[in-house]
Image (tube, helix red, strand yellow):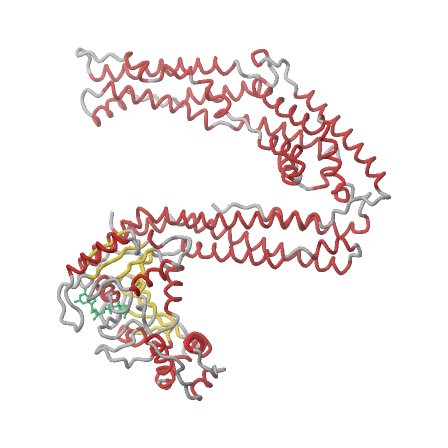
Amino acid sequence: MSRATQISNIIEKRKPQAENSSLALEKLDSLFSIVKELEVCRDRTCQRIEDIFIREKLKELHFEKIYEKIRDVEYIIQRLYKRFSRKTLTIAFVGRAGQGKSRFIQSLTGLTKAEVPDGGIENCTGVKCTISHVPETETYGEVYFHNRDSFLEQNILPYYEFLGLENKPNSLQDFIDSPLPEMKTSGSEVEAYYGHLQKCHQNYTNYQEFLQEVSPRRIARGDIRQFVAQTDENNQRNLFSYLTVKEVNVFCTFPQDDVGQIQLIDLPGLGDTVLGDKERIRQSLGQDVDFALFIYMPQGRILQEGDYKLYDIANDALTELPIAKWSFMILNQVVSSQAEGIATNLSLCNTTKKRIEDEQRIKVRACLIADCANKEVAGGVLDEVLKELDENLRNLDNEYASVGNIEIKNLQADLNQFINKAKQAFSVAPTLDETRNFRRLFESFTRDITKELRTLLRQIEPMNLDVLENDKDADFFRATLNQLLVKCNENTGIPTKEDVLNREMDIGTGAFPAIFASYLDEIRTHIRSHFSSVDNGLKEYVDSVKQKVAECFTEKTELGNLTPLRGTEFLKFMAEEIPASEQSLKGAFSRLYSFEMSYRTNFQYRILKALEDLHPNRSAKLLSTRNDKTDLQIAESICNILQALHQSAICNIEEALEKFQGEPSLAVYAAVDEFVDEIVRSRKARDRWYDFLRERSSQIWSDEFGQKVKEERKEWIQLIDKAINANRFDFI
Ligand SMILES: Nc1nc2c(ncn2[C@@H]2O[C@H](COP(=O)(O)OP(=O)(O)OP(=O)(O)O)[C@@H](O)[C@H]2O)c(=O)[nH]1
Ligand SMILES: [Mg+2]
């Protein structure tokens, strides 16, 4: 596979996750606006309503906290969306100044000092520079400039803050017109930062014109250096334009024609004069990057504190994914050098590699020694990176996405709590005067629900509690079973004799016994797969009974006024709505709601015996491969035996299962009977219902209780139902 195909395959695999993230963002958006509607309604109601208890409860709802949580999750999902919808694979180069990051990029891209400035002695790369491969293009750049405000905010004021300088300028003009305050402390870091301010102050006329520029400005190849580098080609620090630049994109054609959709990010080296660099490195790594290459050129005393510090800064970039899982350390091997201060270093590279691997303070996927100035070697490193991404990017993406999932789940749980609280705001218990009326309604509720559930039980009662004698609803089971058997007979998975011969050709002469054994396994699995894929009949059967139970509540009593949800969803609603303190009621609804039947769990073990003869250890002996038989004859006899075994297995399955046609109605009856016991027949259940209904009396019998706040409550409950629905969504 070419590199380009490999890369585009990796990118393509991310699409479903990009779509999921975008959907989740839409859902969060609508959740936000529904909560907003709820808040508006709350504020209006608080002004109108007289009941101080309701007012108090409404005021206790902290909307701000919910907005904040939604925004936090939105931020995470947006980052995920950005990552999954990237059209390129992005590799960032990280390291302290002068380690060879830019030189490495030159080797990979075929670009020169003019477009990817490198330089000795002084720190060189001044701004983040993203280099993209575009086939057959003249190299050009796009520069994003600061305006006067962002320049002051990001390039000047943080230095005043850090250095503790007085008379902070109010505007850029103010900064230029006033003398720079005296430096208060000393030290190399302080001096470097003060030096930066001096540079900006003294050279204003050299760069001011760029602060008026419209971004992005397209520039030609030859102009790139002056916007990216701090030094000119002779290592002189007389470039100033880079001060005004936020970032630069360079578009060029990489010399290898198969690199495809790839992007390289050259970052300024750390340990520089620029204060915001740490933050910028973190941001770039956290938001724009799929893989990081740490570049380190061992010279003199290796692995100083600053090198570890840089690693820690990078590791902070994406708290969700430790950088150890998505980075390499490249030890830049200098093979020959005329440059001042740069010496050959193979033995130092080996020592460094060993120390990194032994110490485990810098953890990376791999530590490679490579000559960054050599095109072939650099290409080899790129291949290693692509191999790594090919094998691991999906895992990383999934790991990252699962962080989003957890955040969404937490938000949903918090919102559910909030909604529950909001829901209670209008539930006013009956007043003393109303209590007698409530009792009457309560009595009639218990009478009605007991009667309805009993009637239902009679309807669904099996003919006989012995499964072998029970014919209740057997027709439906018989029909589903027949459908299944027809499927098994139509799609047997039995090979033709040509298939058998082909397989023998593939595996080798004399392999018939092994081939026969593997077909036995395959056919058995094939039959099983028919059984596990068809579960609908049973699910629908169980659901129809659950639906009838729900109807007893929603159609025959007033309980349906609690929610617009109906059928099995009503049972789920009740399981959630009943407070944990009423465990016996809550558990009964929850058990009935989650009661399920399927062929897989309820019947599959009953066909085990019928499949017994399709096991090689029982039937392998049926095949004779005597010498006087031709290959064709053996292949034919394999097909015939398989056919016979298959047929007999299907007959056995039919026989085994038809005995159990009474099972579904028995199982469902047992579940409902238990439910009725727990819900109405137990002595305690009555008291539980009393408390539950009393607290919700104004919702259930809205014509009788809480009349004064009827309209307000109606609107409120409608909005809450909207919020409940908006809060139910999956991410992945
Ligand atoms: N001989 C030799 N010189 C190298 C090699 N790698 C880098 N250099 C030189 O080392 C100096 C610094 O390299 P750069 O690529 O500018 O380093 P950088 O990491 O980009 O530094 P900053 O931009 O300041 O962060 C330059 O003069 C390079 O030409 C190498 O493998 N061999
Ligand atoms: Mg550089």
Q: What x and y, as percent, mark residue 449?
A: 74, 30
When asked about the image quadrant of residue 543, the answer is: top right
Residue 656, above or below 339 = above
**Ligand 1 in which quarter:** bottom left
Image quadrant where residue 637 sits? top left
Q: Percent from the top left, x then y, of residue 414?
A: 58, 50
Above/below status of 515 relative to 556: above
- Dividing the picture into quadrants, the one containing residue 182 is bottom left
User: Relative to 40, is 503 above or below?
Assistant: above
Residue 157 appears at what percent x and percent y? Answer: 45, 77
* Residue 677 as seen in the image, left or right of residue 208: right
> Does 158 sit left or right of 712 as displayed?
left
Q: Residue furthest right?
A: 433
Residue at (19%, 19%) from the top-left corner? 510
Q: Is 583 left or right of 653, judged from the image as shown?
A: right
Residue at point 71%, 60% (across, down): 43
639 vs 131, nearest the viewer: 131
User: Which residue occupies the foreground of this view, 264 or 637?
Assistant: 264
Please indicate, yes or no, whether residue 190 appears anywhere in the rendered image.
Answer: yes
Q: Residue at x 86, y 44 (%)?
A: 433
Circle count: 0
Say whether residue 214 is visible: no
Residue 389 x %, y %? 31, 50
Where 421 sits versus 458, above or below? below
